Image: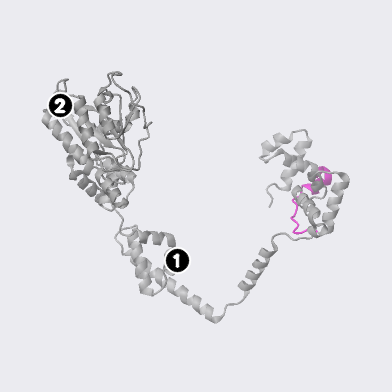
């Protein structure tokens, strides 16, 4: 049955001849295009009601008919739609295909059958094979297989009814497939066909067998991580907790699941949302300003190649001007390790030189020169600081004035340290210094980093040295 029957087409043509437009009729009756309406009108004018009747598809036109169509089109210089309408053809594109074939191969091209002959020959061959009657041995083999599949299906239904849970878990399903295979001595392929499980699903589940984790196991493991160094590990975010679960517990778990569980348990650290006051050691140009050699290129694949240094203040007691200490660490950008540090009441030049000399004197022999990057603090413009670097054949680099992002790696370190250390109120200077010293030791040896493949800075450097050796 065609989409639009004869009665409908007559109705549309009648309204068109009565004066209505083709576009409005197409919209009114849900016809896809006004050209369809015009086509019905032209066919009615050519052939009357017979032109509106549904045309039957002809499987193959004779080569003589095709030649007549092409000759008529050439003599009358008619368009493809007019020619199709004249000969009552279903599609103008059919005439275009005939013209192309005639130009390429002459009349022989018009005699070509539809479709690919090789493919059609294969289909005929398959149909002949399917039509052949099966031998008695093949029928017997097929009956045995069907009987075996029925037994497997019955056994599967019996075992699944005995399960305590309504939904069969993956590891239970894998065990069940193995049992059925051993019981009936058949291939895995046949068992999976009966149970209707894709082979890829079965082998993936088998490969990851034993790794299924429930939330209770994950909660217990996260709680153990938080208890290892309660003072610091309780401040771990979900990414660092995920790294610890994967590296220390062998879990295969997504960080989004860890985030969900930590939210539910109210274990997410909120300390990083607090804003901290920053210490500024810039006193103007009081010495020599070195060029910026880093240009924010903080990454390096070599230890001790790029070192960053800065000073920050930490307060205790009532946090007044007289209750503060200063910290200067020397940070290796290769693994984020603190090579040396100093804590003092006053940020003098001698205070800054002590950790610098300690770090440079402990550097191993390298095949490349080290670069030390700082801001434009008055200590780093000092002649003694510059002479110390020259003595050890170290390049000096400085951030641009009032551009803290040029030393962003050091600023990030201070931010992390203040979040994880200064969440407590320290009454005395000794308490604060002890907490800072303990945290730096924890940071170097036990605090894991995502960008270090879940390892601490010292562990990452040691493994890199072992690989290089």
Label 2 Cα neighbours within 10 Å, binned few <14 / some 14-19 / many ≥20: many
* Callout 2 secondary element: loop
Where is mark 2, residue-wise?
Answer: 316
Checking the image for residue 193, the label placed there is 1
In which quarter of the view is residue 183 placed? bottom left
Q: Where is residue 254 drawn, in percent x and y? A: 34, 47
> 4 or 290, which is in the foreground?
290
Q: How far from the left and from the top, in percent, is residue 328?
A: 22, 30
Which is more toward the observer, 37 or 307? 307
Residue 117 rendering spot, x and y as whole percentages: 70, 63
Which residue appears farthest toward the right when viewing the image?
Answer: 75
Question: Which residues, given as a range, are shown in magenta?
Answer: 43-61
Left or right: residue 128 compared with residue 277: right
Please determine whether, in this image, residue 444 is positioned above or below residue 196: above
| Above-or-below relation of 3 to 382 | below
Which residue appears at 17% of the width and 30% of the height? 343
Q: Earlier in the sequence, mark 2 or mark 1?
A: 1
**Residue 108 visible, this angle:** yes
* Residue positioned 40% across, 62% down in the render: 203
What label does residue 166 carry, if any?
A: none
**Is 1 situated left or right of 87 in this image?**
left
Q: CA distance from mark 2 to mark 1?
A: 72 Å
Q: Is residue 140 magenta?
A: no
Neighbor class of circle 1 (other Cα within 10 Å; few <14, some 14-19, many 20+) is few
Q: Seen from this angle, which residue lies furthest front?
A: 391
Q: How is the image coloured?
A: one colour
Q: Is residue 313 toward the left or the right of residue 132 in the image?
A: left
The image quarter containing residue 441 is: top left
């Amino acid at each position: 049955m065609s989409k639009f029957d004869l009665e409908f087409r007559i109705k549309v043509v009648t309204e068109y001849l009565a004066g209505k437009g083709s576009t409005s009729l197409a919209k009114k009756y849900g016809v896809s295009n006004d050209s369809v309406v015009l086509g019905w009108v032209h066919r009615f004018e050519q052939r009357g009601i017979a032109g509106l009747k549904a045309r039957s598809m002809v499987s193959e036109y004779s080569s003589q008919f095709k030649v007549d169509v092409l000759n008529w089109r050439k003599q009358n210089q008619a368009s493809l739609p007019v020619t199709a309408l004249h000969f009552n053809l279903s599609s103008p594109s059919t005439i275009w295909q005939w013209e192309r074939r005639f130009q390429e191969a002459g009349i022989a091209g018009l005699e070509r059958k539809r479709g690919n002959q090789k493919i059609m020959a294969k289909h005929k061959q398959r149909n002949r094979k399917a039509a052949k009657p099966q031998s008695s041995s093949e029928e017997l083999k097929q009956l045995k297989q069907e009987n075996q599949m029925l037994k497997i299906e019955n056994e599967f239904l019996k075992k699944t009814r005995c399960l305590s849970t309504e939904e069969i878990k993956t590891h239970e399903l894998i065990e069940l497939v193995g049992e059925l295979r051993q019981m009936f001595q058949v291939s895995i392929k046949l068992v999976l066909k009966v149970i209707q499980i894709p082979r890829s699903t079965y082998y993936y589940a088998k490969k990851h067998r034993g790794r299924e984790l429930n939330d209770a196991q994950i909660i217990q493991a996260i709680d153990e991580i938080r208890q290892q160094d309660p003072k610091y590990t309780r401040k771990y975010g979900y990414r660092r907790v995920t790294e610890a679960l994967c590296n220390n517990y062998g879990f295969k778990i997504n960080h989004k699941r860890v985030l969900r569980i930590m939210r539910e348990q109210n274990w997410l650290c909120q300390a990083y949302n607090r804003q901290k006051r920053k210490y500024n050691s810039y006193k103007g140009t009081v010495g020599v300003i070195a060029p910026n050699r880093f240009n924010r290129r903080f990454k390096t694949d070599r230890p001790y190649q790029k070192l960053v240094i800065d000073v920050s203040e930490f307060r205790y007691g009532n946090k007044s001007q007289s209750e503060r200490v200063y910290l200067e660490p020397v940070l290796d950008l290769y693994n984020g390790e603190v090579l040396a540090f100093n804590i003092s009441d006053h940020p003098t030049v001698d205070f800054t030189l002590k950790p610098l000399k300690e770090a440079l004197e402990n550097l191993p022999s390298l095949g490349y020169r080290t670069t030390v990057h700082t801001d434009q603090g008055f200590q780093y413009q000092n002649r003694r600081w510059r002479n110390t670097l020259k003595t050890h054949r170290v390049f000096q680099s400085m951030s641009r004035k009032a551009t803290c992002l040029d030393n962003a790696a050091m600023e990030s370190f201070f931010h992390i340290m203040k979040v994880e250390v200064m969440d407590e109120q320290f009454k005395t200077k000794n308490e604060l210094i002890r907490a800072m010293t303990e945290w730096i030791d924890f940071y170097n040896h036990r605090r894991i980093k995502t960008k270090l493949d879940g390892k601490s800075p010292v562990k990452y450097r040691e493994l890199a040295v072992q690989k290089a050796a």
